Each structure stands twice: as C-alpha cells, then as structure tokens.
Amino acid sequence: MQRFLSIDDVPDLNLLVDTALALKQDPLKFNQLGKGKTMGLIFLNPSLRTRLSTQKAAINLGISAMVMNMNQEGWQLEFDDGTVMDAGAAEHVKEAAGVISQYCDIIGIRTFAGLKDQELDYKEHVLSQFTAHASVPVISLESATLHPLQSLADLITIEEHKRKSNPKVVLTWAPHPKALPQAVANSFVQWMKAAEVDLVITHPRGYELSKDFSESVAVVPDQNNALRDADFVYAKNWSCFENYGKILTRDPTWMVTKEKMSLTNNGQFMHCLPMRRNVIATDDVIDQSLVLAQANNRTFAAQAVLKTILESI
Amino acid sequence: MQRFLSIDDVPDLNLLVDTALALKQDPLKFNQLGKGKTMGLIFLNPSLRTRLSTQKAAINLGISAMVMNMNQEGWQLEFDDGTVMDAGAAEHVKEAAGVISQYCDIIGIRTFAGLKDQELDYKEHVLSQFTAHASVPVISLESATLHPLQSLADLITIEEHKRKSNPKVVLTWAPHPKALPQAVANSFVQWMKAAEVDLVITHPRGYELSKDFSESVAVVPDQNNALRDADFVYAKNWSCFENYGKILTRDPTWMVTKEKMSLTNNGQFMHCLPMRRNVIATDDVIDQSLVLAQANNRTFAAQAVLKTILESI
Amino acid sequence: MQRFLSIDDVPDLNLLVDTALALKQDPLKFNQLGKGKTMGLIFLNPSLRTRLSTQKAAINLGISAMVMNMNQEGWQLEFDDGTVMDAGAAEHVKEAAGVISQYCDIIGIRTFAGLKDQELDYKEHVLSQFTAHASVPVISLESATLHPLQSLADLITIEEHKRKSNPKVVLTWAPHPKALPQAVANSFVQWMKAAEVDLVITHPRGYELSKDFSESVAVVPDQNNALRDADFVYAKNWSCFENYGKILTRDPTWMVTKEKMSLTNNGQFMHCLPMRRNVIATDDVIDQSLVLAQANNRTFAAQAVLKTILESI
C-alpha cells in the first residue's frame, strides 16, 4: 500500500481488518518496525480523535510523529496552479508538500470540505494537489469527501460486535445546527458496500448523497421503516450534496431516540464523534452505544494502515 | 496513587517529597518505567512551566507525551449533563474524556476558573466532569481552585532552602491589573497546612480565601506585621472569593519591595510565575528570589507524581 | 560551539559544512549522541521548514524536542528591563528564558523583526534578552536581522551544486505584497562573504541593506547586468532598511523570469521559502530550481549545529 486516501487504495480489505484486530491484541508487537522513521501529521482543520489516535498508532510502531497545525503555525497555502500569489497565501502547496516530504517518511493530512464549491470539494482539490506534490506516502486524516481511517475503525467495530453474519446496518441522517461535510457518510457507505453487511440509508428528501457513493444502496425515506430490524444504527448529519452545503431542515424528529432504537433488532448505536448530545441522539441512546469502542479502534485502524505502508516503503 | 487532583490524593506526603528529591539527584534513573506508556496533556488554558516541565518529567520516565490545546486544536466542550447541544459546543466531556482515556495511560488536564460562578468553580465542575468520565488516572495541571503540582514544587523548594525547622511562611496577596483565580493561593495554603511550617496569610480586607482553605490559619491584616521574621515570603495575587472574581483594589503599597523584605528573617521570596515585575514585587526582590528554583522543581514534582501513579497502575 | 545566533558563533565554517554533508550521508549515525537530552523549540512567529527540519534533526540525534508556540500557548512576554508590567505582558523574558533553560539542554527560538524600530530590531532586542537570561546554548531559528540555519543550508546547497570553484552568486531583491524583514538577505550576505564565492547584490534604489552586511560586496543597480553569468540566483524580498520597514516599490519587472535566467551562466535559482509564485519568480523558474534541495538541507544544517553544540556541553 503506497497511500491511504480511500478504500480504493486498500489491496486486501480482510487482511487490513485482520491486521488491525491482531495489533489490538498486541499493540507493541511491532514497536521496532518504525524505528528511524518519521511521520508528519498536518492539520488544516480541528481534530481530537484523529490527532491523538494516529499519534498513538505511530508511537506503538516506534515512528516519531511531528504534529503541525498548518494555518496557525505555518503559512496560508495556495492550491491553484498558475496563480499570481499576491493575496493572502504565502506558500504554494507544491513547495509545502515537497518540503514536508523531505522531513517525513509518511504524511497524514486533514483538510475539510469548504462546502461552497461542490466540484472543487468532490475532485478533492486540496488533497489531490498535496498528494501530487508529495514524494512520500500520504494518509488521509479526513478529506473533503472521505474519512477512510474512521470507516476502517467503524468496520472493525462492526466485525467485533456483530451477532450474526450479514448484519443490517442503517446509516441515518440526523439533525445538526451547522452545515457539515458529507465525508463521513460517503466513506461509511463506500466501506460498508465492500463489507458483508446489508446496508440501508435513510435521510430527509433533498439529502441524497452523491450517486458515486449511494449507487446500488437501498435508500428508505421513512426513518422508522429503515430502522426496523437494524443490527447497527450509524447516525450522522450531513449537509446537502445537490443544493451543495445547504441545510434544508433541522427536523428534531430525525434525532435517534430510545423509542426508535426499540424498532431495531436490539441494534447497536454508532457515531464517529464529535456528537451533539440530544440533537443527533438522546443521552440514553449514546450512553449504551458503541461510540467509545469506535474511537478506540481508531488507534488500531491507523496502526494497521501505518504498518502496511511501512512494510511497502 | 490513582489520581492527583489535590493533596487529598497523596497517601504519604513525606514519601512524595522524598521521591521528588531523589529524582532530582538522578532524573533518568527510572527512564524505562514509562516505556510503552502514553500521557495526554490537555490544555484548556495557556501554560508555559506546566506544559514543559510535565513533558520533561514524562520524557525522563520514558513516557510518550501527546500535547493538545483543546480549544484551538479540537472541539469546544460541553460540561453539563442533559444539555441539548445545539449551541457552540460540538463535543460532550463524556465522549472527550472517554475517548482520550483510550489513547492515554495517564491524562493531565488544565482548566482555569471562569471567575463568574463561584459554586461552579468551587465544585470543580469541569475537572470533576472530566475525571468522572475518564477511565485512566487524571493529574491536575491546575484547576479552577487548586494547583497541586505547583504546591508540591513549592514545598520541595521550601524543604531545600529552609534554614531552620518549622520556618515561618507568609502568603501575601499582591496587586495585579487583571482578575486572577484563587487556585495557587488555595492550594499553597492546603499544602503548607500539611507541612511543618508556621503559615501566616496577609491580604487586604475583602480578599479572604474560602474558609475551606483558610480555616485554622493565622490571618494578619497588616502586611508589615505579617512579614516580620518571615523565613519565606510567597506573593500571589488573587481576586475576591466572596465578591466572586472581583478586584477590590490594586493598591501598589502591597507590592513586595526590598524594604518589606528587610522586615523578614532574611526571608526568601517565592512566586509561582508568571509574575508581573514591579507590580507583584520589585526587580531587586525578584532577582534574588527562589522563583527559578521553584520552576525547576516543577519537573521533579511532576516526575514524582507520574512515577507514583505508574507504579500503581 | 556554545550558541548559534550568527556565523560569528561558528569556530570552523568548513568543518560545519563537512559535518552537515557527512550527516546527510548517514543521518542516524549519531542517534545516541542526544540521548537523555531535551531541546525546546520556542516560536514567537510562524514556521514550517524550521519547525519540522529542526525537530527532525533533533530526532535524528536522539534528542527529545518540545515545541511551543509562545504567544498562543504561553504568556505574552515583556522584553524591557525595569518596566512596571501592568499592561499586556504577563511574564518577563528573565523568568521565561531562565525557566525554559531548566527544562531544556538546548533552546531554539524564532523571533521576527517588528519592522517598526530599526534600532531595537538591529540590536536584536528580543533574542539578546532571551539569550542573556538563558543558561543553556541558544540556537536562532531566525531572528530580527539574521537566519543562520537557512544560510548554512544555502551554503551547503551551493557547495553541492556548484559546477566551478568561486561561482558567481547573485542576491536579487524581488517584489512582494507585504513588508518583510531583511533577515534572510543579511544572513545570506554574511555567509556568502565567508564562503568562496563571487557575491553580487542587486536591488531597486532605496533597498540598500545595512552597511554592516553589504560592506565590501559589489552592488549592481541594474538587475539584468547583475544576473549576467550568474551561477546561482538567490531571490528574496526585503523591506527598506533606511526608510525602515517601508515598501518603496512592488515593481513586477524585478520578478525573476525565464528570460532573466537566460542571462545567467545556466544559473540555478534559489529561495529560502515560503515563496509567492509569479510574484518573486515565475512558475517555470521555480519548477527547475534548487528550492527543495535547500529545504532538504535545512535538516542537516540543523543537525550539524546541534551535533556540534552537543559535543561541547
């Protein structure tokens, strides 16, 4: 594996999950593998879980991590080619990615969607430019349209907690006061389609995900119908894809409650965090959920990806 | 020791001081003890000494430290239970503390008093909520009402520099342009009461500390009287406890000067830093003080606490 | 070597360059040298290359690095002696430098010119005060008037890429939308004067560097004339020294283009980065330049300096 920007970079999904689960049993087993190697963790946006779990994964493998908040600590970057850089941006991504590649054996980068220009976000303008000019493997720490480390952790969590083969997994939209990217939802759909699960999506009218992701997935408009017999309920807010970045509704009846969970097959609640309590889901649902298990698996997801990359460089 | 939020968590004070003094003689003696262990240093407020000395203590013990400025680098936290989180806070402390506990073997957290709601601050709302939801030992890096790592360093410094048993230690209020918490003063009083010293407090009328701390301590209203024959003079500003968070006076005659120090028993001046020169005390007083010795002992205070916790987890 | 604030601190320039080149061949050869040692990297201003390359250099030598953004993470510092500190600054550099010295074996500090008070900047008020009160070796990570780690990396790059002895090196001013310090230009001139090169400076009228640096260096007012037969073209913007900190022109005809490079002896383009593309130089010039080679050498410049200092403490 030479990079990890999406599931398409994973040569063997089962092997990656197995690697993560094995590392979870013995996190320090390969703590010499990364000796003398350095990882750069570059953040263009906030992060708690990704920041700490990826650092922890690096530590477990003996990799030295250098963390940098690009906007506050470095220079504002330009991502377009050919620009006359006489405005805010002091450094071009060509130089930034090229330079960081010289100090790091692996680079992780987080860059959120701007939610203003659908085309720019969906061609992953920032991540693509960074990757194009980096000369070492790049790992996505969440990009405009995808969050593969989260999805891998989610898949591991489902593997650990499923009580039958081919469990029913429902991805449900939930309300939120602010406009959020579609990245977690897109990515979750992509990974679930590759996994042995029965995936159903439910969301209010107008919140259709890009067909590139939702194609061939059952979309059930009525949330209650969708939740029926679910083994896993994955809640997440996202803003509109078509009416790009817009909020059409904050309808609180889409919040996941204990009553809604009672429609499921003793279903287990999941969310990527951070989560607004009593907006996305009620306290009682969250307090009996898998959210901490998911967050815990972030370490081993990152560690499996780093180990796999280390072994191929 | 399973946590370090106040002196009440210390099973054997003399042993802890002795541990710190022994580590100071040979800081790297236990540099394998923390191997494979990770510490999270979570800052909700600025920090210089605590940030660097606790990192240094971790390094000395072989612990990997991950530092995070929660507000700038992560998400705004909610600390109240049952809230409908539709305003600023994106993540609840239940998740944040639970998640960080999965990546760290020990967590240090700094959270200052808001100085608006006495009850909230004095029940240590933020720290208590964090600790309640953390599943690993928590160390206070200064909380709303206490700063135990500072007080331990102060006690070590007094032990090193005392010229007689039962020295007279005077805690004197000093002026300051901004409203500051009572944490350092409260904590110092708590630790001095447990030590073999003769403690006296002096402050302008209206600056009484909470009785929970000042009870059984001599309060001498006249600063000059209080300072007479002092072996150690510990200056610190704090805002009102009763008229909570208010500044009643900035009276410059409370500044510690060479003249005032001449009233003492060749007394040694102390302050926790940061300190405003020529406001808290004059240059000549500070330049012959123990402030750097105190700051140096912060490393060994933190190292003693971390070592003691490591040995019990 | 007990500090590294300018070329004046270097006892043997050839030896330092040779050390850097040897480390580049085998970066981890001395990875035990810094064991048990700690370096503080203190930033009062943004940094990408210096931040990451100096950390990387420390890692390569086995030194533990602690990075701190003083203004955002710590306290606002006072640098003047005798001040009554009742305004913004909460901590005096006397305490800050003294305290950090107790946690670190080596301190690196970055502090840019304010560009308001020439005298203050050119006496290196901030760096001098910090160094005066530090009790361990201090390394400049760029100061008000100099950037020696950059200049050392530049010299190494020229040594590696020169195609003849005594190459012609042209330092040319280039336009920029914002007022920048003279530090990189001053420092480059200082180091080139000590190297075996034929140095020429070119800039618009009014952009003369301080005579302390430009003395005995040929200044050719016409850029085209200056560039003729150049082996290396080092572009950099700086604001006025005499009309201190002012921008007199943004004349785009000073931008380095392919046409201008054609006047040179197949000259190689250099810049310290960050660089505004199509303002300082055109894309085609930058894309065939040495800028990434320079940035790469930042690691080995820092590593050579750290190794030399480690061996003398």
Image (cartoon, coloured by chain):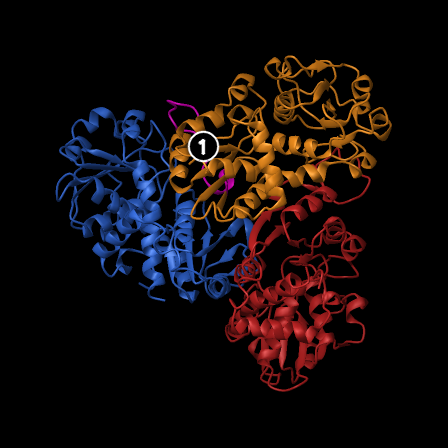
Chain colours: A orange, B red, C blue
- A191 to A293, vertically: above or below: above
Q: Quadrant of residue B95?
A: top right
Please state the horizontal and vertical placement of residue B267, each as a whole percent of the image: 59, 81
Please state the horizontal and vertical placement of residue A115, each as a whole percent of the image: 59, 23
Q: Which residue lies furthest to the bottom in this view?
A: B164
Within the magenta stretch, is there residue A284?
A: no
Query: Magenta segment, principal secondary structure?
Result: loop
> Residue sitting at 42 percent across and 56 percent down?
C62
Q: Quadrant of residue B309?
A: bottom right
Does C186 sit left or right of A1 as displayed? left
Please state the horizontal and vertical placement of residue C182, each as a whole percent of the image: 32, 45
Foreground: C235 or B166? B166
Chain containing mark 1: A
Residue A145 visible to the viewer: yes
Question: What is the magenta range?
Answer: A68-89
- C118 to B291, vertically: above or below: above
Number of marks drawn? 1
Q: In which quarter of the image is residue C258?
A: top left
> Residue sitting at 30 percent across and 47 percent down?
C24
Q: Name the residue under label 1.
A: A77
Three-letter amino acid code at disc 1? Leu
- C12 to B22, vertically: above or below: above
Foreground: A56 or B88? A56
Does A51 sit left or right of A278 as displayed? left
Within the magenta stretch, is there residue A72?
A: yes
Please state the horizontal and vertical placement of residue A121, each as a whole percent of the image: 54, 21
